[in-house]
Image (cartoon, grey):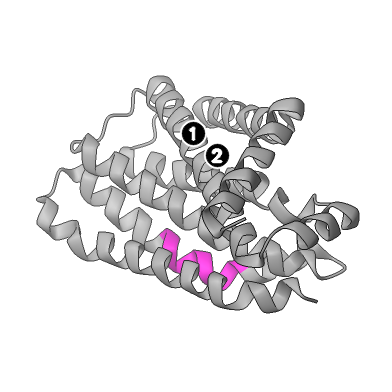
Amino acid sequence: MNLISQVKHLIKKELLLEWRSKYTLNGVLLYVVSTVFVCFLSFVSADKITLNALFWIIMLFASINAVSKSFLQESKGRQLYIYTIASPTALIISKTIYNVLLMLLLTVIALGFYMLVFNYMPEDLPMYFLATVLGSLSFSTIFTMVSAIASKAGNGGMLMAILSFPIIIPVLVVLIKLTKNAIDGLDRSVSLDEVGILLAINVLVMAVSLLLFPYLWRD
């Protein structure tokens, strides 16, 4: 099969496995809903800047729970089977696309519930929504590659936390600045630098994944 056909079949496999168990989706949704409700009980009179920071903290841990399992939950037998029928490039692309779709769904649900519970409405809602989409893309691409690296180690969870920290902190700083501009209703030209940085990070991480994953997968 060619690359596109392999990617389509691997994405279909991920969707079927998720539909049968619904473990990841239901678990992360429960985490997001319960965390938002606890924050609502604890931060009744918080300002929009604090609520913005809380939202990204919630989404950070939700993305770790959702995306980290993409490689860590794969059994050795399944990995060997996929190794014999698909190319490593098709595998990393399919995993990234599936995680992007999953994170976009979770982000839309989380943002809608967050806005409903806190009566939270940024001045520039389209720009804020664009920032959340870019954040979902960044979390998905970064944690997918880090999960692939961590799956080859014995203590995958600990290694993933160590590897993710220096990469995800700059992304969070840019996201918080971008969403703060949207909350304040600043002119959109002010946020072009942050949007460009996030797009560049996504392209760079995806390029590194495509270059390095085939060597990692052979191990």
- Percent position of residue 207, x then y: 47, 72
Q: CA distance from mark 2 to mark 1?
A: 5 Å
Kind of element beneath mark 2: helix
Q: Residue at x 69, y 36 (%)?
A: 24
Amino acid bearing label 2: Leu
Q: Is residue 74 above or below residue 210?
A: above
Q: Residue at x 49, y 33 (%)?
A: 105
Compared across the picture, whether 189 is left or right of 157 comes to left
Label 1 crowd bin: few (<14), some (14–19), many (20+), radius 10 Å = some
Q: Quadrant of the N terminus?
A: bottom right
Kind of element beneath mark 1: helix
Label 2 close to label 1 by CB (< 8 Å): yes
Reply yes or no: does residue 66 show up in magenta.
Answer: no
Q: Main secondary structure of the magenta part?
A: helix
Give 22 or 93, whichever is nearer the viewer. 93
Q: Is residue 168 above or below residue 139?
A: below
**Rendered image: mark on residue 105:** 1
Amino acid bearing label 1: Leu
- Percent position of residue 146, x then y: 64, 66
Residue on which the image places disc 2: 102
Quadrant position of residue 185: top left
Which residues make up the magenta segment?
Answer: 164-172
- Percent position of residue 136, x then y: 45, 48
Q: Residue at x 42, y 47 (%)?
A: 53
**Rendered image: mark on residue 186:** none
